[in-house]
Image: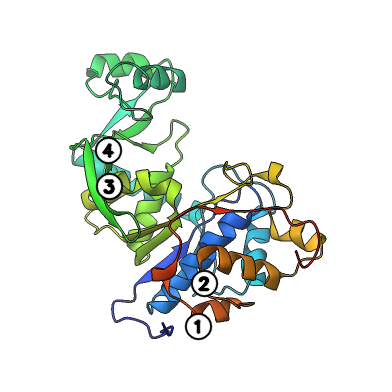
């Protein structure tokens, strides 16, 4: 399949949105390559957005950007930083509040975990403990701890369509929109940013597939169409668990310290996706782009001990 670089009339986009909590490992780089390839071969813009509302490790964002450039990825426009739009995210929450679609939540993490673990609870989902508090009860609880703001969801599940998984129905709960420290939550920020930045194609690891229904539902409430989803299988360590530092050299810098070039890394990333050999650059990945041949199984990374392995 030959890549197409013409931009569609609606100026749509794909994106990669790393969290700067540390260096990118091979699984992150693989997802970035896939997201870039899907955008470039479908005529979309490709955006790079740093999702820095939560844990931020000093220097991580800069290293993330450098690593993506090193493997040959490019993007349209400057690198975006989510933290610059906090006031705007809060404005969108105010709109939902005015429509009666939010409520204050005073639960601690321990209380939420206990309630979600109870019989008939949805694992990991918020059971609505604070949904029906009276104004008197809310006033009393505000003297004990600042509230988070939750969505008052009108459905218990929602269905999306994924390029690889097909039709997928997942649980929707009263998700947090604003944490009790006043910071916009991930699910809110990612939905608002994707919609308002023209992102209609979301490529990410398939561990995030369960979050797609709740995000698509929130997008609908905010008046935006859901993006098309493409959840790619993860990279696992040799033991079958998610790739981690314990699996040896798993970042670009660590592999370069062992004598491996960025081209070596691109070759492994492309092979793990199922891109036909031989490829040494991101541009060559586009020339051989055919997701129909990709494996639907997770890729397993075996540690590299020396250059050329």
Dot 2 corresponds to which residue?
275
Q: Position of residue 253 (x, y in %)?
A: 74, 59
The residue mark sitting in front, 1 or 2, is 2
Q: CA distance from mark 4 to mark 2?
A: 35 Å
Q: Are marks 4 and 1 in contact (CB under 8 Å)?
A: no
Note whether 263 is above or below 223 in the view shown.
Answer: below
Name the one closer to the observer, 72 or 74. Answer: 72
**283, above or below 182, in the image:** below
Residues at marks 4 and 2 touching, judged by CB atoms closer than 8 Å: no
Mark 4 or mark 1, earlier in chain: 4
**Helix, strand or loop at mark 2:** loop
Q: Is residue 213 visible?
A: yes
N-terminal of the two: label 3 or label 2? Answer: 3
**In the picture shown, does residue 186 fall above or below 289?**
above
Mark pair 1, 2: CA separation? 10 Å
Q: Which mark is residue 218?
A: 3
Residue 55 or residue 214, whichever sits in front:
214
Q: CA distance from mark 3 to mark 2?
A: 35 Å
Give x and y (percent) for residue 290: 43, 74
How many neighbours does mark 4 have within 10 angstroms: few (below 14), some (14-19), or many (20 or more)? Answer: many
Earlier residue among tags 4 and 2 = 4
N-term-proximal mark, 3 vs 1 = 3
What is the distance, in whole Å, between disc 3 and disc 4 at their CAs?
9 Å
Question: Which type of secondary structure does the marked residue at label 4 adopt?
Answer: loop
State which mark lies toward you, 3 or 1: 1
- In the picture provided, is 249 more to the left or to the right than 158? right
Figure quadrant of the N terminus:
bottom left
Give the residue pinned by disc 4. 172
Of callouts 3 and 4, which one flags the residue occurring earlier in the amino acid sequence? 4
* Residue under the image location 30 percent in, 16 percent down: 119
Q: Which residue is mark 1?
A: 287
């Amino acid at each position: 399949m030959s890549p197409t670089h013409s931009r569609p009339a609606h100026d749509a986009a794909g994106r990669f949105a790393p969290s700067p909590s540390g260096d990118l490992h091979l699984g992150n780089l693989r997802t970035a390559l896939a997201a870039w390839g899907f955008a470039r071969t479908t005529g979309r813009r490709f955006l790079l957005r740093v999702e820095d509302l939560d844990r931020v490790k000093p220097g991580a964002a800069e290293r993330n950007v450098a690593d993506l450039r090193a493997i040959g990825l490019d993007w349209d426009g400057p690198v975006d930083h989510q933290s610059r739009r906090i006031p705007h995210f809060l404005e969108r929450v105010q709109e939902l509040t005015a429509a009666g679609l939010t409520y204050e939540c005073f639960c601690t993490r321990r209380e939420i975990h206990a309630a979600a673990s109870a019989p008939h609870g949805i694992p990991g989902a918020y059971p609505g403990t604070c949904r029906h508090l009276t104004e008197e009860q809310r006033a009393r609880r505000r003297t004990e701890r600042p509230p988070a703001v939750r969505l008052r969801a009108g459905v218990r599940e929602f269905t999306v369509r994924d390029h690889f998984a097909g039709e997928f129905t997942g649980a929707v709960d009263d998700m947090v929109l604003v944490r009790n420290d006043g910071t916009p939550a991930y699910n809110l920020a990612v939905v608002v940013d994707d919609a308002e930045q023209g992102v209609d194609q979301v490529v990410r690891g398939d561990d995030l597939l369960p979050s797609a229904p709740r995000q698509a539902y929130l997008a609908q409430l905010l008046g935006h169409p859901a993006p098309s989803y493409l959840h790619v299988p993860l990279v696992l360590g040799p033991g079958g668990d998610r790739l981690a530092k314990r699996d040896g050299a798993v970042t670009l810098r660590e592999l370069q310290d062992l004598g491996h070039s960025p081209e070596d890394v691109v070759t492994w990333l492309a092979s793990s996706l199922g891109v036909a050999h031989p490829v040494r650059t991101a541009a060559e990945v586009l020339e051989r782009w055919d997701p129909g041949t990709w494996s639907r199984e997770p890729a397993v990374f075996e540690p590299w001990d020396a250059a050329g392995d």
